[in-house]
Image: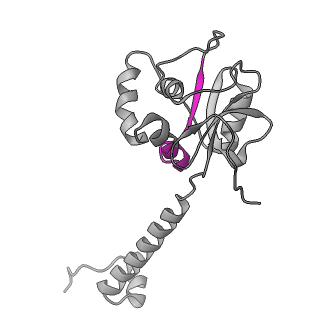
Amino acid sequence: MKNARKRPRAYWHLSRFYSNDTQMRKLFLALLSASILLTCFANKATADVLAVIAPHNQNIQQIDASELSLIFWRKKLYWADGKHIQAVNYAANNPLRLQFSLSILKSTPETQTNYWNGLYFHGISPPHVVDSQEAMLRFVADTAGAIGYIDACKLDDRVKALAWINADGNLLNNAPELNCPQ
């Protein structure tokens, strides 16, 4: 018994509360289930309508889906007035990015990774990435040639809307009726 392995002190105190592995497994599964449910509810933050936005001084009044697709695939790099286009996206795990990507680019952000990895060696970078709608508004408002998208309910006077993408994924040139929470 002299060589018997003792439990390290860090784990000894847990054995008083969880006398067997079954209780520990139940606790782990309960915590895992709770975190998955919270994640699912947190990711339901898609917008009813997205607004495609540009700076007020940008010399464009509206845009169609094919041109928007070319811009965000970085196949169109300059506006008609010669300004460099600065497309802006959200992170790949953002629900607004998923909504935009499925509607306009007809692909998911995850499948776009291989595309961008291939273009990297040709000197073409993916669109800029921001973390929040406020960051999107600020970047677009302050950057010449910028274009991005936000929840239409977050639209303010710092930028102008060029088009709207409804929940069905259709691009609209006229502002739809919005049901924004008060």
Above-or-below relation of 25 to 171: below
Residue 119: quarter of image: top left
Name the residue located 64 percent from the left edge and 13 percent from the top edge: 83
Q: Residue 62, position in %: x, y? A: 65, 27
Residue found 41% across the figure and 71% down from its top: 32
Lateral position of residue 158 relative to residue 130, left or right: right
Q: Which quarter of the picture shows residue 10?
A: bottom left
Q: Quadrant of the C terminus?
A: bottom right
Kindly indicate the quadrant of the structure image that contains residue 146. Answer: top right
Residue at the image point whose x is 40% and y is 28% from the top: 116
- For residue 94: magenta? yes
State the count of labels.
0
Judged from this view, the residue extending furthest toward the right is: 157
Residue 167, visible in the rendered structure: yes
In this rendered view, identify the residue nearer to me: 100 or 26: 100
Residue sitting at the far top? 82
The region drawn magenta spans 85-99
- Residue 103 drawn at (x, y percent): 48, 40
Out of 44 and 48, give the one closest to the viewer.
48
Q: Is residue 9 visible?
A: no
The colour scheme is one colour
Q: Position of residue 6 (x, y in %)?
A: 29, 80
Q: Where is 31 relative to 182, above or below?
A: below
